[in-house]
Image (cartoon, rainbow, N blue to C red):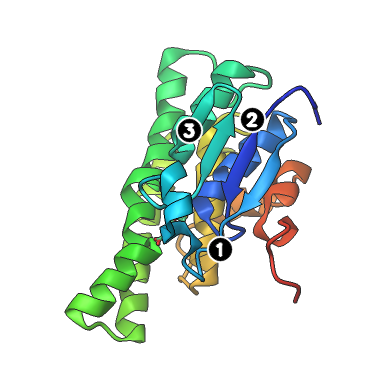
């Protein structure tokens, strides 16, 4: 790991958005200090954290140049500041294809299953636990169904979403699959997504970034 950075990451071990940033940091071999924010106990809604991230979400990254929020903005910053190895392919079209997959996960799927959203519908619409799980499964099925087709169209090789190395697309997909498995989403209809998940979660950078490898992960 390179030691010439001054990066601190506010993270929660199970946060899929923080998991994205951790994977990017590992791939770029950047050293960073991790500052755990406990989403279960509500640390992210306390004044101290809100002063750093007014949206009350993780991740947040503190850099020598200032504070950054939003996982994709943080990853794009790392990509520009520390370009090698790159998380995007060469051509404009290929880069756009990779971003398209990444955004399907980060913008179309993930926001709908965020705890603050499911907690709100639980409290206001009065959904029970099972209905809340149905909500989660519904949006994963919609999102992963479209994603599986898109990956086929893009000729994914079943190891990575795009081309023959890790890109921003895998960085977004893997944490979302981790989450879907945690909530028992049926996964049998997504052979490509499953194959990419199996391959990438065996890579050392993904293992180091995984929830189970984080300092705030409770012991089993
Ligand atoms: N678009 C944001 C999403 C961040 C986000 O939703 N973080 C979740 C954890 S994965 C969170 O902090 N949730 C707190 C809550 O829902 O109360 C990003 O990519 O950074």
Alpha carbon distance from label 2 to label 1: 36 Å
Secondary structure under tag 2 reads: loop
Q: Residues within 10 Å of mark 2 (few under 14, many from 20)?
A: few
Q: Which mark is residue 164?
A: 2
Secondary structure under tag 3 reads: strand
Q: Which mark is residue 38?
A: 1
- Answer yes or no: is residue 192 visible: no
Q: Is residue 128 above or below residue 143?
A: below
Q: Is residue 41 left or right of residue 215?
A: left
User: Does the residue tagged 3 have its C-beta within 8 Å of any atom of ligand 1?
Assistant: no
Image point (41%, 18%), residue name: 93
Q: Locate residue 21, reporting x and y percent.
A: 58, 40
Disc nearest the viewer among 2 and 1: 1
Residue contact between numbered discs 1 and 3, judged by CB atoms under 8 Å: no
Q: Is residue 167 left or right of residue 205?
A: left
Please state which of residues 154 and 180 is positioned toward the viewer in this rendering.
Answer: 180
Please state which of residues 112 and 66 is positioned toward the viewer in this rendering.
Answer: 66
Q: Residues within 10 Å of mark 3 (few under 14, many from 20)?
A: some
Alpha carbon distance from label 1 to label 3: 19 Å
Q: Is residue 153 above or below residue 94?
A: below
Image point (57%, 61%), residue name: 14
């Amino acid at each position: 790991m390179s030691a010439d950075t001054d990066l601190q990451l506010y993270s929660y071990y199970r946060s899929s958005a923080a998991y994205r940033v951790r994977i990017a940091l590992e791939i770029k071999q950047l050293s960073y200090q991790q500052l755990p924010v406990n989403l279960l106990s509500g640390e992210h809604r306390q004044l101290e954290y809100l002063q750093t991230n007014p949206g009350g979400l993780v991740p947040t990254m503190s850099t020598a140049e200032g504070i950054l929020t939003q996982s994709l903005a943080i990853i794009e910053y790392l990509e520009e500041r520390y370009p090698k190895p790159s998380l995007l392919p060469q051509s404009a079209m290929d880069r756009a294809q990779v971003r398209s997959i990444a955004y399907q996960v980060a913008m179309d799927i993930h926001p709908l299953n965020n705890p603050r959203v499911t907690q709100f519908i639980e409290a206001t619409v009065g959904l029970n636990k099972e209905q809340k799980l149905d909500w989660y499964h519904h949006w994963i099925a919609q999102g992963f169904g479209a994603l599986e087709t898109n990956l086929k169209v893009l000729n994914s090789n079943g190891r990575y979403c795009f081309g023959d190395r890790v890109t921003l697309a895998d960085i977004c997909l893997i944490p979302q699959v981790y989450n879907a498995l945690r909530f028992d989403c049926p996964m049998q209809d997504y052979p490509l997504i499953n194959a990419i998940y199996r391959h990438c979660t065996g890579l050392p950078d993904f293992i180091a970034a995984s929830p189970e490898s984080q300092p705030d992960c409770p012991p089993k």
